[in-house]
Amino acid sequence: MTKHLMIAGALAVTVLPFAIAQADRPHRPPPKEAFDACANKTAGDACSVTFGDHTVTGTCSKGPDGQGALACKPDRPPGPPPEAVDACAKSKEGDACSVELGDHTINGTFAKGPDGNGPLACKPSR
């Protein structure tokens, strides 16, 4: 697995803004690194998780239902990868897009973050 693909996958799992979570979709568990970051901590402690050259800071907390093991919950969702934003230079929201992340091509549409703010980025179709 290439470094870029591993980073992209890890960021996608940690709530990438354009990977909008919807109520009818099942919740994905945090990556192992998020649990490891809180292994010797208590709820509310500060934590950080590093994926390649990207570090996400957060707070140790249990799952959304207050159950399960502690994991590092990001202070704020990380932004989309620069490649996803750069692909939007001359496009508008809703246009089709394609972006290269490592040795993979991601197809989707241009969209803003889940709250309608943030930069226009290539949102994966799936």
Image: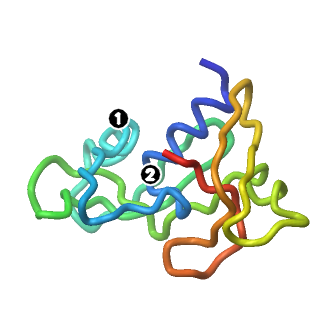
Residue drawn at (62%, 62%), measured in percent from left and top? Answer: 79
Q: Is residue 120 above or below residue 98?
A: below
Tag of residue 108: none
Seen from the viewer's position, the closer of residues 93 and 9 is: 93
The N terminus - image quarter: top right
Residue 63 or residue 121, whichever sits in front: 121
* Residue depicted at 26% across the width and 42% down the height: 39
**Is residue 78 left or right of 27 when viewed as pictured?**
right
Looking at the rendered structure, the kind of residue marked 1 is Lys
**Residue 44: % across, % down:** 27, 68
Question: Residue 114: image x %, image y %?
Answer: 50, 72
Residue for badge 1: 32
The answer for how far apart the CA atoms under marks 2 and 1 are is 11 Å
What type is the residue that disc 2 sits on? Answer: Thr
Q: Secondary structure at mark 1?
A: helix
Please give left or right for residue 106 compared with residue 126 in the image.
Answer: right
Q: Quadrant of residue 58?
A: bottom left
Q: Reply above or below: 104 against 51.
A: above
**41 relative position to 125: left or right:** left
**Disc sitting over residue 14 in the figure:** 2
The tally of labels here is 2
Residue under the image location 45 percent in, 69 percent down: 75
Of all residues, the one furthest to the top in this rendering is 1
Q: Quadrant of residue 106?
A: top right
- Residue displayed at 57% across by 30% down: 6
The outermost residue toward the right is 90
SS at mark 2?
Answer: loop
**Which of the two discs, 2 and 1, sits closer to the camera?**
2
Q: Is residue 101 above or below residue 2?
A: below
